Amino acid sequence: MIETLTLEQRQQLSHDRRKARKRWNQMLRLTQPIDRGQATVAIVQVYAHLGLSAPRILFFPSPDAAWNSIQRKLYTPTRLLRQVSIHLRQVSIQSI
């Protein structure tokens, strides 16, 4: 087992870290759409590698569209009513 790194190895790691950080920062600023086919294949492969079945993969035109979809699913009238009902029961129990 390696317990220490040489100066050259530490310098290489530092250089690699800076290079990786620069690359990720560039990717974060990309604005063109992703290749949905490639993304799907990559996700399915990761799940298969982990021994899991592939999830349902959804694509959205923007982060805002994805957020709106999540909000609609989380805050349906039925779900909101159930949450209010649970809260009211808890308040009633605490006041007794």
Image (tube, rainbow, N blue to C red):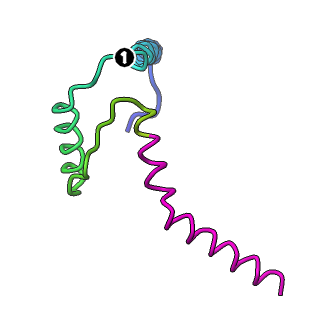
Q: Quadrant of the N terminus?
A: top left
Please tell me whether mark 1 sits on a helix, a strand or a loop.
Answer: loop
Point 45% across, 24% down: residue: 5
Q: Is residue 78 magenta?
A: yes
> In the displayed image of the protein, which residue is found farthest to the front?
77
Q: Name the one closer to the observer, 15 or 25.
A: 25
Mark yes or no: residue 9 visible: no
Q: Residue furthest bottom?
A: 96
At a point 26% along the width and 45% down the height, the residue shown is 57
For the point 57% across and 69% down, the residue is 81
Q: Which residue is mark 1?
A: 31
In magenta, the rendered stretch is 67-96
Q: Residue at x 71, y 78 (%)?
A: 90
Q: Name the quarter where the C terminus is drawn.
A: bottom right
Work out whether 76 lies above or below 81: above
Q: Is residue 68 magenta-colored?
A: yes
Circle 1 packing at 10 Å, graded few (<14), some (14-19), many (20+), is: few
Towards the viewer: 26 or 69: 69
Q: Nearer the viewer, residue 3 or 47?
A: 47
Q: Using residue 75 as the reference point, say whether residue 88 is left or right of it.
A: right
Residue 60: x and y, percent?
33, 35
**Residue occupying the far right of the picture:** 95
Instruction: Kindly report the secondary structure that dominates the magenta region of the rendered protein.
Output: helix
Vertical placement of residue 8 versus 81, above or below: above
Q: Is residue 89 visible?
A: yes
Residue 28 in the image: x percent, y percent? 42, 20
Amino acid under label 1? Thr
Q: Which x, y percent locates residue 37? A: 16, 33
x, y percent for residue 58: 28, 43
Image quadrant of residue 52?
bottom left
